[in-house]
Image: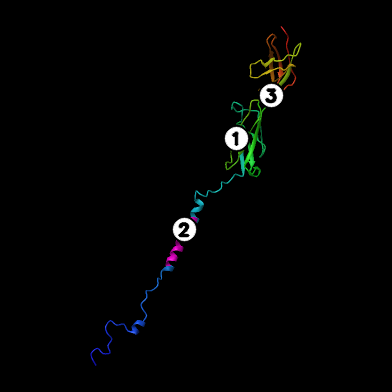
Amino acid sequence: MPDGFGKKPEGTVTAEASAAPRFKPAKRQGKWWDWGIAISLIGLVATLVAWFWPFSPMSPSQPIKPGIYAVRVQVLDPQGRPVEGARVRTSAGNEPQHLPDGWWEIEVPAAKVPKDGRISLWADHQDWDGNRADLSLGDDPNPRAEIHLKEPETWLRGRVEANRALAGLRISRKDGEPGVAFTDAEGRFELKISEPQGMRVRLRAEQAGLEVGDAFCYAGSNNCSITLERR
């Protein structure tokens, strides 16, 4: 037989060789490892957030309100000076106590504080008109407030007596304090003065051609009488 008969030519792939399974790269086995790392990182972040969140400035804790407030109040006259002889009232709390240093103290239990935390304070005095101050109670157990009394405003009403009714008479205070009124056709007047009720005030009435008349009246009176005589 000739040389090479029955031999497979070089470079020829036989059917058996072509049918043999080819080599395939092994699948990646590390994906579970990657997932494990990701889950661990998420857990670490969650732990850090839970640890630092209570201390974060973005979530301040609610202040603890005191169980009882000791409110201190000072009463001042219209010029801003402390006064004695005032009387203080409150919309909530215990009876106000006058302290030796001139201040007033009011104990307000938390149970008596309104839901909005606001209370009202009043001061009265025999020489001035009273006034009011509102106070918001928060986390300060010793809040302070000032109440400024007001200049009193009292009406003094009366009539000028003469031989006939006189209109347009000028009524004023003899001591020169502010306040002027004029009589009507029947000689009646209403004068507003800055004196508390019951205070003695000297008034005068004047008009060209008439003698100046004066009389003592009491603030708040409705029957002050001033007598004039013609020249």
What mark, if any, has residue 145 been given in the picture? 1
Label whose residue precedes the other's in the sequence (3 or 2): 2
Give the Cα separation between the discs numbered 2 and 1: 50 Å
- Who comes first in sequence, dot 2 or dot 1? 2
Quarter of the C terminus within the rendering: top right
Instruction: Name the residue rendered at 59%, 36% in the picture.
Output: 144
Say whether residue 147 is magenta: no
Query: Could you say whether the residue bearing mark 2 is in a helix, strand or loop?
Result: helix
Among the 4 quarters of the image, the one containing residue 142: top right
Crowding around mark 2 (Cα neighbors within 10 Å: few <14, some 14 to 19, many 20+) is few
Tag 3: Cα neighbours inside 10 Å, few (<14), some, or many (≥20)? some
> Which residue is under mark 2?
45
User: In the image, what residue occupies the spot 60% across and 36% down?
Assistant: 72
Q: CA distance from mark 3 to mark 2?
A: 74 Å
Q: Which residue type does callout 3 highlight?
A: Thr
Which one is nearer the viewer's eye here, 181 or 74?
A: 181
Q: List x then y, in percent, for residue 211.
A: 70, 9
Place residue 10 in its image quadrant. Answer: bottom left
Q: Which secondary structure lies at badge 3?
A: strand
The magenta stretch spans residue 34: yes
Mark 3 or mark 1: whose residue is earlier in sequence: 1
Q: For residue 154, which numbered disc appears in the image?
A: 3
The magenta-colored residue range is: 33-49
Give neighbour class at mark 1: few <14, some 14-19, many 20+ (Cα, 10 Å). Answer: some
| Name of the residue lying farthest toward the bottom | 1
Q: Amino acid at mark 1?
A: Ala
Q: Residue at x 45, y 61 (%)?
A: 41
Residue 79, horizontal then vertical, whole percent: 59, 26
